[in-house]
Image: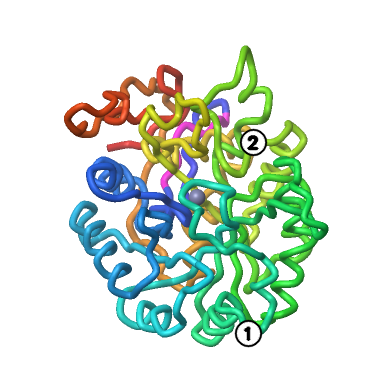
Amino acid sequence: VQLIKDTDGRVTSIVMRKPFDMHHHVRDGEMLKVIAPMLARRFAGGIIMPNTSPPIVTAKQVGDYRKRLLDETGEDFTPLMTMYLTDTLDCDEVMEASKLHDMFGVKYYPRGLTTNSDSGVADPASLWTPGTRPYEVLQTLSRIRRTLLLHAADGFDRTGKELNPYEQEPHFIRETLPRIKDAHPHLKISVEHLSTIEGADYMQSNGDAFLGCSLTSQHLLLDTRDLHRGGFNAHRSWFPIIQGEEHKERLLALAKKGLPFVWLGTDSAPHPVSDKEAACCKGGVMMVHAGIELYAEAFDKAGALANLEDFASKNGPNFYGVQQSNDTITLRRQSWTVLENFSLPVADGADPRSGVVRPFRLGEQVEWQLAA
Ligand SMILES: [Zn+2]
């Protein structure tokens, strides 16, 4: 990494290895075509999430989805494909996909707790209970050295009582993650989009070559005040939900150290405006248009720009066992305004807002800019 400073010692630009985005929803169809070029411009590769509709559960689907993406990004992009852990995911499909199609991991979704999670695992106990299909898949992943990616949230406590949404991640970290680790000691695990103090403390004490986590820029930059100021802001709504300021500060403290088991994952997750400005707003927002720039903002705020390259460009690929990029990008301290919505074709008679995708910070400034 190279930090270029002005005469006052302030960093004005950063030249760094091209980063990897270890958590991305490229979606499919017309949306994928909008997303893919922005993704490949900023990132050398990344983890491609499998919660399309229908979800990615066969080797053939993995290969076809990978091809549809590469058709849009070009071959320089390195997609790390994933599969969706259901109660019936087949171990043979997992092995086949990993052999043939650059499949790097299987994603766990607790059923019903996030976008397209209806096919998710019904009972988290099946992750550590021999004889269940999810357990067998985790055993297979251990054997073939692929990663289990966790949406680290529990919907219910052990007595079956529904949890407060702010407690979903802490409960998972306390009650569920240790059981998975005990049952599968050689399994590589990535806790996705860490969002709480409890999660950060656990990672700080337990992170290693088998356990890491991704962090989003939104969880490093926003807290509940930004979500609720003057009313509920649907375009700042994610899963896991944005927590209080003390959580944001703790996550930033974890990110800025450059620890090898902590890496970048934007969780860019675009929805049409018709699904955001709705009676029940879907979680997830498009972040890809400023996918690396917003992290520069967060690391700058934390006085840790020197560690941005480890976090963004080295730690993720190292954990997953892929080559770091030899290309570089340049980020400049130059604010710009997010000017426009993105458009998709609208079916005849459909809600026109189903063809509009609103990017994060529309009409607002981003402090860092990616040089062309
Ligand atoms: Zn996600």
Question: Badge 2: few (under 14), some or many (20 or more) residues near its Cα, within 10 Å?
Answer: many
> Which residue is drawn at the image coordinates 71% and 80% (left, top)?
183
Q: Which mark is residue 172?
A: none
Kindly report the secondary structure that dominates the magenta region of the rendered protein: strand
**Distance from Cα at disc 1 to Cα at disc 2:** 36 Å
Q: Which one is nearer the viewer's eye here, 133 or 312?
A: 133
- Give amino acid for label 2: Ile
- Farthest right residue in view: 159
Residue at mark 2: 242
Q: Is residue 144 visible?
A: yes
Residue 302, by quadrant, is top right
Relative to 272, is 162 above or below? Answer: below
> Which residue is drawn at the image coordinates 49% and 59% (left, top)?
119
Q: Is residue 214 visible?
A: no
Relative to 270, is 185 above or below? Answer: below
> Which residue is drawn at the image coordinates 27% and 30% (left, top)?
355
Percent position (x, y) of residue 233?
Answer: 55, 22
Magenta residues (range): 9-15
Left or right: 31 as drawn, with respect to 211: left
14 within the magenta span: yes
Helix or strand or loop: what does disc 2 sit on?
loop
Q: Which one is nearer the viewer's eye here, 88 or 137?
A: 88
Q: Earlier in the sequence, mark 1 or mark 2?
A: 1
Residue at mark 1: 131
- Give amino acid for label 1: Gly
Helix or strand or loop: what does disc 1 sit on?
loop
Percent position (x, y) of residue 132?
Answer: 60, 79
Left or right: 15 as drawn, with respect to 187: left
